[in-house]
Image (spheres, rainbow, N blue to C red):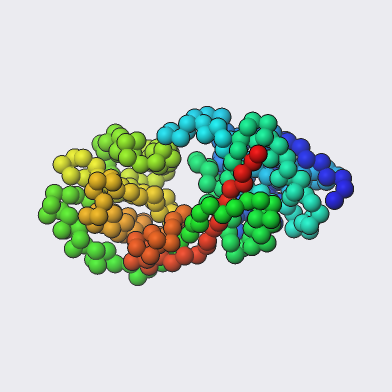
Amino acid sequence: MSGVCIRSYDGSDEAAVLRVWETGLPCDAIDDRTFRRKVLLDPNFDPAWLAIADVEGDVAGFCLTLRRRVPFPKLGLEPSRAWITAMAVAPELRGGGVGGRLLDCVVSLCQAESRTELLLAPYVPNYFVPGVDEQAYASGLAWLLRRGFEVVSRAVAADANLVGFRYEEWAERERALASRGIRVRFLTPADIPALLGFLEATMPGDWLRHARDVLADIVRGHGSFQQFVIAEDAGVILGYCQAEGDHFGPFGVREDRQGEGIGTVLLARCLHGMKRRGSHDAWVVWTSDDSLERVYGRFGFHGTRRFSVLRLRIN
């Protein structure tokens, strides 16, 4: 397509980018507040790395790419990597080379900084989806594979209806844990230091960041400490789970205490709390087929979206 100019993002592009985002990624549209919070205010955001395809003054497409400018807990700067977290071309302009021009721009940016891996899209903290939805964006996935990307893993989003959920079916498991001194209960303000220490010592770095954000909202009056469930033995936290509205997770158990049924009770108690707070459904955006079958499936979760996590090796 002639007349395409690839340039950096400008603040005045926001509304046009969101229009292309909605039409080009219809399953993953976001509003302006989410864009500002998860894109513009991300500490790694750089306007030069949000490539804009401009056709006669109109935004025809964009490619949002991030690389770490600020070290991330337990991951550092990851200097060899960059991530595409969202990319779209206006549907009426596809097939004219706009997407290729955008991707070429991003690859050049990576090469200039000697970054050898371009991933789509397992970036933390502000990812939108794990990768490319294999059904909703099948043509886009095929295009990316033709451009040299390879599938490195797959992820599943899952949902469960909570209307028929009955905690009584899982209460005996909680009583069995209690007989061994393991208490499963809601978080209290007094537990905050212990929870943060547990997360820092035993869980992925982004989980600590996420928990802090949710707890900060709760302290401001937006939410409840009952969004967190913990398992503890003599005051030592062994596992936890959390929820935000209908969104469940993450949840985890200390590695040396896995296999004791603690995670099952944590999940059951968390879902019970969600239902009591008025949630009709629960969803998790990122899990594996194995976890869906072994863990979530027992609670009525079923896969709703499947994603390919992609990588492009850059010379």
In the displayed image of the protein, which residue is found farthest to the front? 315
Q: Is residue 111 left or right of residue 121?
A: right
Describe residue 188's horizontal placement relative to residue 78 as left or right. left
Q: Quadrant of residue 204?
A: top left
> Within the image, what quadrant is residue 66 found in?
top right
Q: Position of residue 183 (x, y in %)?
A: 19, 49
195 or 141: which is nearer to us?
A: 141
Q: Is residue 281 left or right of residue 187?
A: right
- The quarter of the rendered structure image containing the C terminus is top right
Between residue 8 and residue 34, name the one nearer to us: 8
Q: Which residue is located at x 34 percent, y 61 percent?
A: 295
Q: Does residue 9 show up? A: no
Horizontal and vertical percent position of residue 235: 19, 40
Furthest toward the left, the residue is 179
Q: Residue furthest bottom?
A: 164
- Residue 95 place in picture, x, y as percent: 78, 57
Q: Residue 195, how many percent across, how many down?
A: 30, 39
Which residue reaches farthest right?
2
Task: Classify 180 as above or below 13.
Answer: below
Q: Is residue 144 above or below residue 101?
A: below
In this rendering, position of residue 114 left or right of residue 158: right
* Residue at (60% x, 59% y) in the render: 27
- The residue drawn where x is 29% and y is 67% is 166
Up the image or down, 297 lies above or below 55; here it is below
* Picture mark count: 0
The residue depicted at 43 percent of the width and 62 percent of the height is 289
Determine which quarter of the picture holds residue 273.
Answer: bottom left
Tell me if I can see residue 176 in this picture: yes
